[in-house]
Structure formats: structure tokens, C-alpha cells
Image: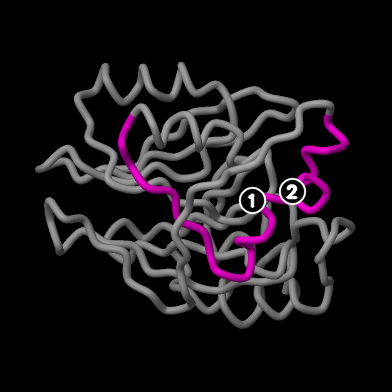
């Protein structure tokens, strides 16, 4: 099951829980802020978070990650090309926010990798490299749920932004057309800053 929790830091951001209903274990995706609220949701529902997954290296998507890593005893994962963002406050944009944030502890992911639960090896997400918003932006795809966590690569109203360090408009468009728009039409796209939309609906807006 997928649960969304909107958190408020410098920006409002969508944090997601992807939980196996049988084992109550799962993944926490993009904990952007308000670690206490996120932690309370985990405890209240009796969930066990095995991994904290980041779609990219901007601070509004990982602002609560380090504290939650400690409280939940769950490692943080990010695509290898965005790993440098976690320790560079210029690249991750937190330096200009008045709240510089770094994440010193993390593991690296790679394109095509399958992230499985220890509690249920049949419950997984596939890592799809979707660069453009940042060089290491990824989409986490669940065929079972017909859902894709796209971070800031794509919003309900169109493509993500590329006017930040490492952003590349051509890469972003290629990622959207060749990676995200080739997912099944009924796939629900879950972004960091907008409401869900299906691939079919997004195609009508973009293509």
C-alpha cells in the first residue's frame, strides 16, 4: 500500500510510505521535513521501515532523512550520481535557504537495481534513472501497485525544473519521453509537489 504525507519545511513536499500490508515493513521515500510527524506516522501504524529512499539530492526531499535514519535504524539510499549533493549545501540548495543541511551517511543505488524487502522478497521497487532535474534523479517503479515515485522529474502540470545546479532540460525531456511515458498507461505518477496523475493523463498534456 502507498500512503502520502505532506510535510512542510521551506517548501511543502510529498513524503511517501510504500508498505507491504502483510509484513507491515516497507520503504520511506523522500522524507523532506518534519521528522517527528513522519516518525509518529510510522509508530502509530506499526510499520517497520527497512530503507529510506531519495529520488534526488535536493534538501526539500531529504531534510528529515538523517534524523529518521537514526530513529528508525534504516539506511538512506540515493542514486550514485546524486550522492555528492548530500554533502554540498550549494548543490542541494539548502545553503541559500538559511537552513544548510547535509547527510553524511548513505548508500548508493544504480540504474536498473531492484530494491527488495528483507521481510518479503516479492515486495520491491525498480530503480529507473531519470536524469534532468538533477544528474542522479531516479524514479522508483512498482509494477504491483502500478505506481511510480517520480520525485521532481515530472508534475501533474508538466516537466520538472532544470534551473538548478546540474539541471539539464534535454536530459529531462528524454527521461520523461523514453522512461516515464513508456510505463503502462495506468501507472500512477507520484511526484514531490503535485497531485497524482496517470501516465495516460500526462501523455495528453505533454505529447
Q: 10 Å neighbourhood of mark 1: few (<14), some, or many (≥20)?
A: many
Q: Residue furthest front?
A: 104
Indicate which disc residue 86 carries.
1
Q: Does the magenta run of residues contain 93?
A: yes
Q: Are marks 1 and 2 in contact (CB under 8 Å)?
A: yes
Is residue 166 positioned above or below 9 on the image?
below
Most foreground residue, 54 or 155: 54
Mark 1 element type: helix
Q: Which residues are magenta?
A: 72-97
Q: Position of residue 104 (x, y in %)?
A: 56, 46
Q: Position of residue 72 (x, y in %)?
A: 32, 32
Q: Position of residue 114 (x, y in %)?
A: 32, 71
Q: Kindly indicate the quadrant of the structure image that contains residue 73.
A: top left
Per the image, the residue denoted by label 2 is 92
State left or right for residue 202 relative to residue 117: right
Most foreground residue, 9 or 151: 9
Residue at 16% from the left image edge and 55% from the top image edge = 118
Q: CA distance from mark 1 to mark 2?
A: 7 Å
State left or right for residue 7 relative to residue 92: left
Most foreground residue, 130 or 177: 130
Q: Position of residue 195 (x, y in %)?
A: 59, 40
Is residue 5 positioned above or below 102 on the image?
above
Most foreground residue, 122 or 205: 122
Mark 2 element type: loop
Residue at 47% from the left image edge and 65% from the top image edge = 108
Q: In the rendered view of the protein, which quadrant contains the N terminus?
A: top left
Amino acid at each position: 500500500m502507498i500512503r502520502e504525507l505532506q510535510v512542510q519545511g521551506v517548501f511543502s513536499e510529498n513524503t511517501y510510505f510504500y508498505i507491504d500490508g502483510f509484513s507491515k515493513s516497507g520503504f520511506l521515500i523522500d522524507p523532506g521535513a518534519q521528522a517527528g510527524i513522519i516518525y509518529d506516522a510510522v509508530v502509530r501504524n506499526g510499520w517497520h521501515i527497512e530503507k529510506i529512499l531519495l529520488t534526488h539530492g535536493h534538501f526539500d526531499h531529504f531534510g528529515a532523512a538523517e534524523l529518521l535514519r537514526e530513529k528508525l535504524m534504516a539506511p538512506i539510499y540515493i542514486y550514485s550520481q546524486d550522492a555528492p549533493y548530500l554533502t554540498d549545501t550549494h548543490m542541494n540548495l539548502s545553503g541559500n535557504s538559511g537552513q544548510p543541511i547535509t547527510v553524511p551517511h548513505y548508500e548508493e543505488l544504480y540504474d536498473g537495481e531492484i530494491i527488495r524487502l528483507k521481510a518479503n522478497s516479492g515486495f520491491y521497487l525498480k530503480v529507473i534513472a531519470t536524469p534532468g532535474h538533477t544528474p542522479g534523479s531516479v524514479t522508483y517503479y512498482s509494477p504491483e501497485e502500478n505506481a511510480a515515485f517520480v520525485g521532481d522529474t515530472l508534475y501533474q502540470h508538466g516537466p520538472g525544473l532544470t534551473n538548478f545546479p546540474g539541471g539539464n532540460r534535454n536530459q529531462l525531456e528524454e527521461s520523461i519521453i523514453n522512461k516515464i511515458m513508456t510505463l503502462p498507461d495506468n501507472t500512477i505518477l507520484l511526484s514531490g509537489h503535485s497531485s497524482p496523475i496517470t501516465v495516460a493523463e500526462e501523455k495528453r498534456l505533454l505529447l
